[in-house]
Image (tube, rainbow, N blue to C red):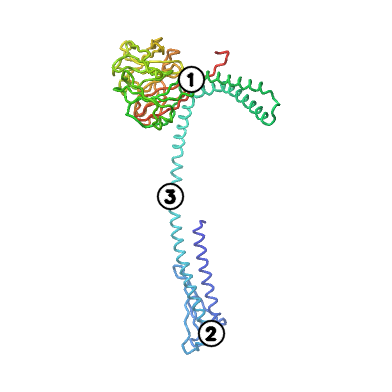
Amino acid sequence: MSPPLLKLGAVLSTMAMISNWMSQTLPSLVGLNTTRLSTANTLTQISPKEGWQVYSSAQDPDGRCICTVVAPEQNLCSRDAKSRQLRQLLEKVQNMSQSIEVLNLRTQRDFQYVLKMETQMKGLKAKFRQIEDDRKTLMTKHFQELKEKMDELLPLIPVLEQYKTDAKLITQFKEEIRNLSAVLTGIQEEIGVYDYEELYQRVLGLETRLRDCMKKLTCGKLMKITGPITIKTSGSRFGAWMTDPAASEKNNRVWYMDNYYKNNVVREYKSIADFVSGAQSRTYNLPFKWAGTNHVVYNGSLYFNKYQSNIIIKYNFDSGRVLAQRSLEYAGFHNVYPYTWGGFSDIDLMADEIGLWAVYATNQNAGNIVISQLNQDTLEVTKSWDTGYPKRSAGESFMICGTLYVTNSHLTGAKVYYSYSTKTSTYEYTDIPFHNQYFHISMLDYNSRDRALYAWNNGHQVLFNVTLFHIIKTDDEA
């Protein structure tokens, strides 16, 4: 039985007990304990002159206690003991009547609560019945979702298998580091126990091996793009910002080039922090205006496309001079073969772990993308690859380890859709999404030192993190 029903039963039981008490106690209190009462709703055989007339108690249809008492004639002495007892009894009866009324109100309230609970239980019962009816449908839907997730994870199996082999080498490094840490801790406790020179050579040897391992990890295949991280909001909708991937670790200069034409001013900042705060360190006035936003700083020099031409300019920041310039043969320019957003983005200059590259399109290749590796000193084309991807259908592109990655749009929903490996001269269609937070990308370049993508996203300078799949080669495989 539910708590409300138990409460209602307790109240009714209490009322019955009170009724029974009153029927048995009233006569005794007024000195009528020697009289015999007849059945319910009949008078006791007592003269009005002798004392009280008392009806036995009963219950009305609503469950309330009813008790009738007839007072004696007024000629009885009102000051005797029985009169005082009757007055006390009357007060008790009034108090009991009030208590019974309170119990009645509580009973009505609990009854309403029971009705409400009954409605809720019926609703729950209906919901459970609906759930039972839909159980098979829900299980089928959940099973399909799990199957789709498993299908997404299947391509990772060969990746994980490869990492099993790579993890062994990493584990060896970790073990050696732990051993050296234990040795160093012992030295702190007791100087002179170990040969310091021998220990120092072991540390140098481990450092060399770790650096060799990192060199083997330099190149990899793009697996994922995360972010972006917004560094700053400045400039127009279109522009470029970059750091030098070939610079030393202490050199963190940032270069800023606003807009995609009619400009020749390059702003320099000593660090990312200065760039964010606006603490400009130097300004360069280039001898030519640039076209597009696809410039690159590499090994201390700026490489850009001269406005209204297919000429590439190499400008050195330290000397403030043009060191080289060369026409990129057959390359379209001035919005003949731009990216999807236009902006004179016909020629895209970029750098990766291998060197300097130019990405463009020609009539000879039917407007499809051409990849050319450039000599960083003379700007001569050392080798070219013709792809089958239309330049005008590309949102942006960037090079990682000799592989060109092409996005399918510069707008929301863009993803890396196509890649071409210059190492194997093969292509594949990919599906690597990334978050175009500010809806319009006009510059996207990979920085091999930072392992990040620099982007100009609708007047916001942002960074994307990249995840590369590395295959560690042993010395025997090198």
Distance, label 3 to label 2, CA atoms, is 60 Å
Q: Which residue is mark 2?
A: 82
Towards the viewer: 307 or 369:
307
Relative height, residue 31 to residue 408 (above, below):
below
Distance, label 2 to label 1, CA atoms, is 110 Å
Figure quadrant of residue 420: top left
Q: Which residue is mark 1?
A: 220
Q: Residues within 10 Å of mark 3 (few under 14, many from 20)?
A: few
Whole-percent x and y of residue 365?
A: 33, 12
Front label number (2 vs 1): 1
Relative height, residue 303 to residue 182 (above, below):
above
Q: Which residue is mark 3?
A: 123
Disc 3 residue type (three-letter) = Gly
Residue 476 seen anywhere in this rendered image of the structure:
yes
Disc 2 residue type (three-letter) = Lys
Towards the viewer: 431 or 110:
431
> At numbered mark 1, what does the secondary structure look like: helix, strand or loop?
loop
Disc 1 residue type (three-letter) = Gly
Whole-percent x and y of residue 422?
A: 43, 13
User: Mark on residue 434?
Assistant: none
Whole-percent x and y of residue 401?
A: 46, 17
Figure quadrant of residue 257: top left
> At numbered mark 2, what does the secondary structure look like: helix, strand or loop?
helix
N-term-proximal mark, 1 vs 3: 3
Front label number (1 vs 3): 1
